[in-house]
Amino acid sequence: MNHEWQDRFLAQTGATVPLICGPMYPCSNPELVAAVSAAGGIGVVQPISLTYVHGHEYREGLRLINRLAGGRPIGFNALVEKSSKVYEQRMIRWVDIALEEGVRFFITSLGNPRWVVDKVHAAGGVVYHDVINHRWGEKGRDVGVDGLIAVNDRAGGHLGNKDPRALLDELLPLGLPIVAAGGVGSAGEFVDVLRHGYAAVQCGTRFIAATECRTSESYKQAIVAAAERDIVATQRLTGVPVAVINTPYIQRLGTEINAFWRWMFKGRKTKHWARSYFGLRGLWRLKRDQQREGSGSSEYWQAGRSVATIDAVQPAGEIVRSFDSARQSAL
């Protein structure tokens, strides 16, 4: 294990366990985020989930999470892709309020994080940036991010295209702490990833199958029942590959977008319109499913290949403690 990187991550975030509950749409409800932080990891707020899915006024939602976490540090996910001026201004305001409410750990995704870095560093905080290769890692480093979230080909939801070891080898020369995102569902896998040289691990799928997660029980049980072969990547949900459980709905939907949308996503300007379209369609689908069955996850379930080692729904704190116990035993 690279204890120097782990120690730096823990010092930067205030966590006592090098484990992040990654931001998830729609699964990042306040109780789940807080439970991970309260146990010594760090839960990350996904603001669209907090406000649009779980119905909290934004500032009050942050305060609720802070109370439930018992004052332990929490994080915030800033999606910095400039899909519209209205969205950009809203995200700027969300970041400002998060800083006002004491958040000091930020994860940025889908764009240039410079403005977040400037704001957060001025307040004494740190910024980690989602990347899938060396090129984007270098761009993040050059604008001052403090660490990188290495999204690999085993992740749930939006995933990368490189395996965890190859991606780590590609990013380590950048001289920043690297967090593994994807493929960890058990304490043993957590330890193995840290042994490879990662500073920390970000889990999503493992925490969906947690008691505090307010998704449907059928979603949780699907994760427990799924094998690695049951995970497929489809472009039909957001326009870019998303790892999901291969349900009958996904089989009907398919996995490939047509030539028009492939062209839209390749253009420097048109890709913003394409992302906005798929994003709005996703919100419409979520509201439709909630009206029909009370669950926004009723038709498709995002999950990564870590389903192979997830065999039970457990309290989030129990997951964090079991992972840390395995880490301490391996020291």
Image (tube, helix red, strand yellow):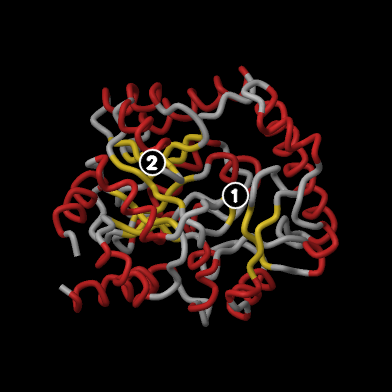
Number of residues whose C-alpha sits closer than 10 Å to that of mark 2, classed few (under 14), some (14–19) or many (20 or more): some
Q: Quadrant of the C terminus?
A: bottom left
Between 41 and 192, the residue placed more toward the observer is 192
Q: Quadrant of the N terminus?
A: bottom left
Between 51 and 261, the residue placed more toward the observer is 261
Q: How many marks?
A: 2
User: Residue 71: percent from the left, percent from the top?
Assistant: 30, 49
Q: Secondary structure at mark 1?
A: loop
Left or right: 254, with 137 as reference point: right
Residue at image mark 1: 25
Q: Which mark is residue 275?
A: none
User: Residue 143: percent from the left, percent from the top?
Assistant: 33, 25
The disc, 2 or 1, on the residue closer to the chain's N-terminal end is: 1
Residue drawn at x 24%, y 72% as measured from the top left: 327
Q: For the residue marked with disc 2, what is the amino acid?
A: His
Number of residues whose C-alpha sits closer than 10 Å to that of mark 1, classed few (under 14), some (14–19) or many (20 or more): some
User: Residue 176: percent from the left, percent from the top?
Assistant: 25, 42
Left or right: 197, with 64 as reference point: left
Residue drawn at x 29%, y 28% as measured from the top left: 144
Q: Quadrant of the rendered structure where residue 104 is?
A: top left
Task: Identify whether 132 is placed above or below 6.
Answer: above
Q: CA distance from mark 2 to mark 1?
A: 26 Å
Task: Identify whether 28 is placed above or below 232.
Answer: above
Residue drawn at x 37%, y 73% as measured from the top left: 189
Q: Secondary structure at mark 2?
A: helix
Residue at image mark 2: 134
Q: For the residue marked with disc 1, what is the amino acid?
A: Tyr
Task: Identify whether 186 is placed above or below 134.
Answer: below
User: Residue 109: percent from the left, percent from the top?
Assistant: 48, 38
Residue drawn at x 31%, y 27% as measured from the top left: 142
Residue extending furthest top?
85
